[in-house]
Image (cartoon, rainbow, N blue to C red):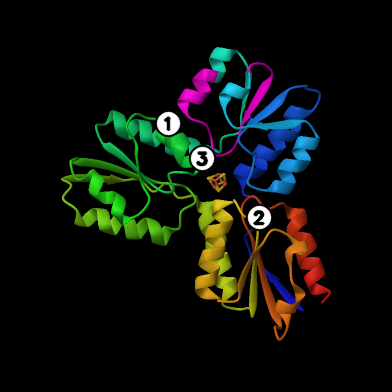
């Protein structure tokens, strides 16, 4: 089978940095915790757990040792609680996520009602909400009604949303009666280039595979995007999940992967597919 791999796919710099820091931090230390799964990939989380990285869901679960803040970041409240406990904090928050948090604070200080376009349940969005007072999350058009009482709106976006979704929401906001709207583009270029490369590849192949964790929001978005451009798109976690019968009659396969998919998973999948 001919297999084409997206020009950009797999670990983004933010995730790669978090994994490197995690590996370095667990060396020689007894109690190392990650506040939330270090990345949305079960296999990586399992391997790091075996090496000593314990995942906790809340700051209440730690009183001593070291805590690693993952690339999605943590809220100010969580960071303050950890500082108060005196635990050692290793901050792997992605610089681009930190930028969004800072912009939220600056917009608030400038008197804007801060609005973040994104998924209110995503940890990055939760961390941004917790980094400045009174930040509102807008997930879709129906959420826009709750903003009508404000005059000055400061708009930012979850880093991993698609440019189309961001533009669409900005279009809707522009039609509402705000006297002032300040928009800061906080989309992640790494995510955008992965999405662009995936769409380009979808158009050249008979079947498209998107590799990555089922809980990884950016992988799911990548798969949704690919599905729009190639109906024969499959979101799989790894080679073991592939039902070979779906390859019947297909000549060229495309492979891309979310920002939390390890290089080995991509390599194994591509190598085995090429052997078919
Ligand atoms: S997807 Fe972008 S913003 Fe998110 S961790 Fe990776 S580089 Fe940072």
Q: What residue lies at 34% left-to-right and 36% top-to-bottom?
A: 135
Q: Earlier in the sequence, mark 2 or mark 1?
A: 2
Q: Compared to 18, does 181 lie above or below?
A: below
Q: Earlier in the sequence, mark 3 or mark 2?
A: 2
Q: Earlier in the sequence, mark 1 or mark 3?
A: 3
Q: What residue lies at 42% left-to-right and 30% top-to-bottom?
A: 131
The local secondary structure at tag 2 comes to loop
- Magenta region: which residues? 63-81
Residue at image mark 3: 123
Q: Nearer the viewer, residue 123 or 245?
A: 245
Q: CA distance from mark 2 to mark 1?
A: 29 Å
- The crowd level at tag 2 (other Cα within 10 Å; few <14, some 14-19, many 20+) is many
Residue at image mark 2: 10
- The crowd level at tag 3 (other Cα within 10 Å; few <14, some 14-19, many 20+) is some
Q: Estimate the x, y position of residue 76 in percent, counting from the top left.
A: 46, 25
Q: CA distance from mark 3 to mark 2?
A: 20 Å
Q: Which corner quadrant holds the C terminus?
A: bottom right
Q: Is residue 41 magenta?
A: no
User: Do the CB atoms of the residues marked 2 and 1 lie less than 8 Å apart?
Assistant: no
- The crowd level at tag 1 (other Cα within 10 Å; few <14, some 14-19, many 20+) is some
The local secondary structure at tag 1 comes to loop
Which numbered disc covers residue 130? 1
Q: Compared to 260, does 94 lie above or below?
A: above
Label 3 CB, ligand 1: below 8 Å? no
Q: Is residue 70 magenta?
A: yes
Q: What residue lies at 68% left-to-right and 28% top-to-bottom?
A: 33
Q: Nearer the viewer, mark 3 or mark 2?
A: 3
Q: Estimate the x, y position of residue 99 in percent, counting from the top left.
A: 46, 37
Q: How many marks?
A: 3
Q: Estimate the x, y position of residue 116 in percent, counting from the top left.
A: 37, 44
Q: Quadrant of residue 49?
A: top right
């Amino acid at each position: 089978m001919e297999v084409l791999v997206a020009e950009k796919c797999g670990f983004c710099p933010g995730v790669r940095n978090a994994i490197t820091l995690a590996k370095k931090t667990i060396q020689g230390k007894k109690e190392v915790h990650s506040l939330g799964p270090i990345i949305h990939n079960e296999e990586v989380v399992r391997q790091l757990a075996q090496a000593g990285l314990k995942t906790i869901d809340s700051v209440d679960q730690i009183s001593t040792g070291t805590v690693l803040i993952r690339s999605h970041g943590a809220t100010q409240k969580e960071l303050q609680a950890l500082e108060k406990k005196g635990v050692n904090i290793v901050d792997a928050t992605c610089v681009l996520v930190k930028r969004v948090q800072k912009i939220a604070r600056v917009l608030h200080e400038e008197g804007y009602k801060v609005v973040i376009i994104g998924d209110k349940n995503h940890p990055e969005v939760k961390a941004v909400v917790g980094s400045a007072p009174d930040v509102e999350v807008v997930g879709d058009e129906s959420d826009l009604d709750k903003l009508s009482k404000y005059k000055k709106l400061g708009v930012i976006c979850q880093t991993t949303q698609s440019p189309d979704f961001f533009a669409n929401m900005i279009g809707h906001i522009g039609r509402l009666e705000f006297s002032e709207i300040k928009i800061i583009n906080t989309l992640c270029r790494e995510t955008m280039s992965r999405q662009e490369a995936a769409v380009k590849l979808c158009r050249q192949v008979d079947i498209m595979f998107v590799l990555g964790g089922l809980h990884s929001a950016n992988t799911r978005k990548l798969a949704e995007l690919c599905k729009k451009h190639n109906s024969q798109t499959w979101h799989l976690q790894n080679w073991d999940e592939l039902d070979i019968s779906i390859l019947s009659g297909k000549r060229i396969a495309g492979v891309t992967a979310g920002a939390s998919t390890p290089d080995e998973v991509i390599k194994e999948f591509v190598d085995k597919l090429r052997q078919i």
